[in-house]
Image (cartoon, rainbow, N blue to C red):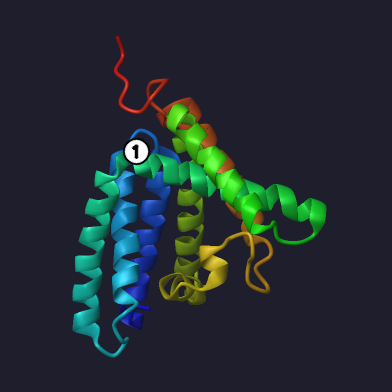
Amino acid sequence: MLPAAYQLPAAIVLVLSGALSAFFGHRLFRIVLLVFGFLIGALAASSIVGMSDTAPMVIAAVVGGILGAVILRAAYFVGVALVGAALGAAMAHLLFSPLHRGEPGVWVVVLAAVACSIAAVYLQRYFIIVGTAFVGSWTLLVGAMALVGDRAAVAAAIAGDAWVIYPLDPAPGRRWVPLVWVVVGLIGTAVQLGVTGGDKGRVGAKKK
């Protein structure tokens, strides 16, 4: 978790990166991979340093962020598959929970993630659009909650609290959050499909 002085800037970064992913994820997918690779690497690296050690924490966050960005950018097609896997896992929970009033089994999640990751490789455009829209909308939502006064949101995001990392299991008093997340994700998907999604077909395809 970052020191309090860095939490507001972190919230702004979450909002901007979330908006970039939600509404321009397909067109700027390589940049999105760099941004989220940096965020993941920075959070992972800074979590191993004590909060009282501000300078080492910042250094660890920067170094970890750079490494994360490089790794995720280099693993471009792996990134596509990961987007599909994440979407598959989310779909498994969304479809299973209302029907069975509980969590899906591990194998259900794994099979859904594998199936969607394979499909993502062949249907890159659509999986990237949907995946980046929903990942970006969640990041945007967490950052926006922090900016409007819910500092616990960004603190939880930086600390890795379960309700932030796992949006389908919201914290008490935040049962409205998944609904807003889905609505914003659908808006982001529509915007990308209709306006900012670029050419049809595989990522990087050029108009003839």
| Amino acid at circle 1 | Phe
Q: Residues within 10 Å of mark 1 (few under 14, many from 20)?
A: some
Depth order, front residue of 48/56: 48
Left or right, 136 with respect to 46, comes to right
Q: Name the residue: 64% across, 65% down.
A: 169
Q: Residue at x 42, y 20 (%)?
A: 200
- Identity of the residue drawn at 58% across and 40% down: 186
Decide: is 178 above or below 149.
Answer: above
The residue tagged 1 is 77
Q: Who is closer to the viewer here, 181 or 51?
A: 51
Percent of width and height locating residue 59: 18, 74
Q: Relative to 94, does residue 116 appear above or below in the rendering? A: above
Task: Please count the marks in the image.
Answer: 1
Query: On the picture, is 156 further left or further right than 51?
Result: right
Q: Secondary structure at mark 1?
A: helix
Name the quarter where the N terminus is drawn: bottom left
> Where 12 sits versus 188, above or below?
below
Residue at screen point 21% across, 67% down? 62
